[in-house]
Image (cartoon, rainbow, N blue to C red):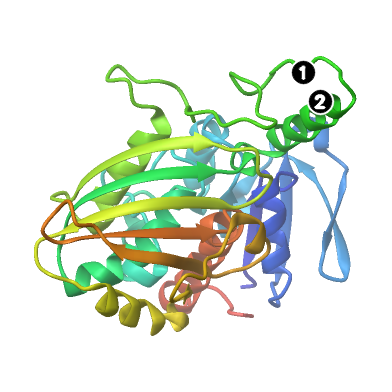
C-alpha cells in the first residue's frame, strides 16, 4: 500500500513549509486541503503542482496520515473526523497538546513516545517557542537538573499567520506615507512597536501563549520544572527569539554549557561562543536552533542566561512535523505502509 498524506491548511505559511520539506522526499501521494475559498488553487510541490481540495466534505478514508496546520478551530472539528476514518493525525495546533494520552513530541527529546499515538491516533506538535527552547534546555537538564525557567519571547508576526504578516507590512508602508494605521488583527499597532500579548488573557493575567510554554515544558521535561514566561509580538516577519534564564539544582558552568551545546550540531543546535550572536533575520529558512550569549546569573546559586533564536516556521513547526512523520513511518508503520522516503 502506498503512503497517502493529507496536509490541512496547505495554503498557510506552515502548510506551505510542510509541503516544501515533503517535496524533498519521494512521497507516494500528497493531498493539499484548505478552506472552500482556496479550493482549486495551485501549490508548488517540487517539480509539479498540487490542486487544493476543499476540506469541508473531504473523505479521509483513503488517507494514512493527516497533518493539520490550520488552527485550533479546524482541528477541533476535523481531527475527530480524520481519526474516525482511520487516519493518524499529526496536529500542529494547541487543541490536543495537553490531552491525556496524546504524545507531545520533539523528536530529539522524546521520539520514543511517538508510539503513544495509538491512544487516540493523534500526535501533537508543540508550540514553536517551546520547541526551540526545550531543544536546548533538555541537553543542559541532563548535566544539571533544571529547577526554574524564566523566559521572555520575542515572536514574529508569522506566528500568527499570513494575515498578521500582511498587517505589519501594510502598517509599515502607511507610516512612511503618513497615512493612518489602524490595527485589525493585533490589539495594538505592530509596525515599529512591541505588543506584550499573544493569545487571549487568562484569569491570572497570563496570556494563553504564556500558559502553553509553561504547561508544554512540564509535559516534556517533567512536572517539577517551574516555568514563567512573558510573550511579546515584535515587528519581525519570520523568526522567534527567546531570552532564557535557567536555575539549576547544581553547578553547571558557562564553559560546560558551551561545550555541551557546541557538540550538539547533530541535534540541530548551533552554538556561538564569545560575543557573537544570531538575530531573527539571520535564521530565515534555517533549520537549526541558534544559541548565544550564555552567561552566568549571579543572582542565584546555580543560574545561566542565554539567547535562543530559530525560524519558527521551520524547526518551530514544519520541520518538527516532518521529523515526526519520518519516525512514525520508519519505526511504527513500516510493516503497514510502503516506505518511499
Question: Compared with residue 81, is residue 64 higher up or lower down, i.e. above or below?
Answer: below
Q: Earlier in the sequence, mark 1 or mark 2?
A: 2
Question: Compared with residue 268, is residue 199 higher up or lower down, i.e. above or below?
Answer: above
Q: Which residue is disc 2 drawn over? A: 175
Residue 315 quadrant: bottom right
Residue 205 quadrant: top left
Which secondary structure, mark 1? loop
User: Do the residues under discs 1 and 2 have CB atoms within 8 angstroms?
Assistant: yes
Residue nearest the observer in this picture, 165 or 340? 165
Q: Is residue 126 visible?
A: no
Q: Write the residue at 65% across / 63% down.
A: 282
Q: Write the residue at 33% across / 49% down.
A: 102
Q: Write the residue at 57% across / 36% down.
A: 71
Q: Is residue 284 left or right of residue 198?
A: right
Q: Is residue 319 left or right of residue 185?
A: left
Q: Write the residue at 51% across / 62% down.
A: 320
Residue nearest the observer in this picture, 229 or 341? 229
Q: Which residue is disc 1 drawn over? A: 181
Give how far across and how far down residue 105 sits, in percent: 38, 59
Single out the mark in the foreground, 1 or 2: 2
Question: Compared with residue 275, is residue 104 higher up or lower down, i.e. above or below?
Answer: above
Give how far across and how far down residue 199 sits, in percent: 48, 28
Amino acid at each position: 500500500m502506498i503512503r497517502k498524506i493529507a496536509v490541512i491548511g496547505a495554503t498557510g505559511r506552515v502548510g506551505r513549509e510542510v509541503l516544501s520539506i515533503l517535496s524533498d522526499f519521494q512521497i507516494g501521494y500528497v493531498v493539499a486541503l484548505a478552506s472552500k475559498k482556496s479550493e482549486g488553487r495551485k501549490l508548488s510541490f517540487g517539480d509539479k503542482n498540487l490542486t487544493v481540495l476543499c476540506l469541508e466534505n473531504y473523505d479521509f478514508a483513503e488517507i494514512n496520515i493527516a497533518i493539520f496546520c490550520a488552527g485550533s478551530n479546524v482541528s477541533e472539528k476535523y481531527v475527530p473526523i480524520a481519526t474516525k476514518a482511520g487516519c493518524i493525525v499529526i496536529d500542529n495546533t494547541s487543541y490536543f497538546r495537553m490531552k491525556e494520552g496524546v504524545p507531545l513530541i520533539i523528536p530529539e527529546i522524546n521520539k520514543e513516545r511517538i508510539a503513544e499515538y495509538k491512544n487516540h491516533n493523534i500526535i501533537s506538535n508543540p508550540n514553536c517557542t517551546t520547541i526551540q527552547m526545550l531543544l536546548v534546555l533538555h541537553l543542559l537538564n541532563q548535566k544539571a537538573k533544571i529547577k526554574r525557567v524564566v523566559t521572555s519571547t520575542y515572536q514574529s508576526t508569522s506566528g500568527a499567520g499570513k494575515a498578521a504578516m500582511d498587517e505589519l507590512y501594510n502598517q509599515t508602508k502607511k507610516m512612511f506615507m503618513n497615512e493612518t494605521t489602524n490595527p485589525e488583527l493585533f490589539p495594538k499597532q505592530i509596525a515599529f512597536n512591541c505588543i506584550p500579548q499573544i493569545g487571549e488573557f487568562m484569569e491570572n493575567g497570563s496570556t494563553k501563549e504564556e500558559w502553553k510554554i509553561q504547561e508544554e515544558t512540564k509535559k516534556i521535561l517533567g512536572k517539577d520544572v517551574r516555568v514563567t514566561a512573558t510573550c511579546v509580538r515584535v515587528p519581525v516577519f519570520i523568526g522567534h527569539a527567546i531570552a532564557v534564564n535557567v536555575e539549576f539544582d547544581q553547578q553547571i558552568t558557562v564553559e560546560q554549557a558551551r561545550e555541551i551545546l557546541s557538540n550538539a550540531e547533530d541535534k540541530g543546535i548551533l552554538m556561538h561562543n564569545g560575543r557573537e550572536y544570531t538575530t531573527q533575520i539571520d535564521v530565515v529558512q534555517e533549520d537549526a536552533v541558534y544559541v548565544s550569549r550564555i552567561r552566568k546569573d549571579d543572582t542565584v546559586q546555580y543560574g545561566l542566561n542565554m539567547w535562543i533564536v530559530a525560524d519558527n516556521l521551520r524547526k518551530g513547526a514544519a520541520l518538527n512535523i516532518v521529523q515526526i512523520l519520518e519516525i512514525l513511518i520508519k519505526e511504527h508503520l513500516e510493516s503497514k505502509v510502503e516506505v518511499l522516503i
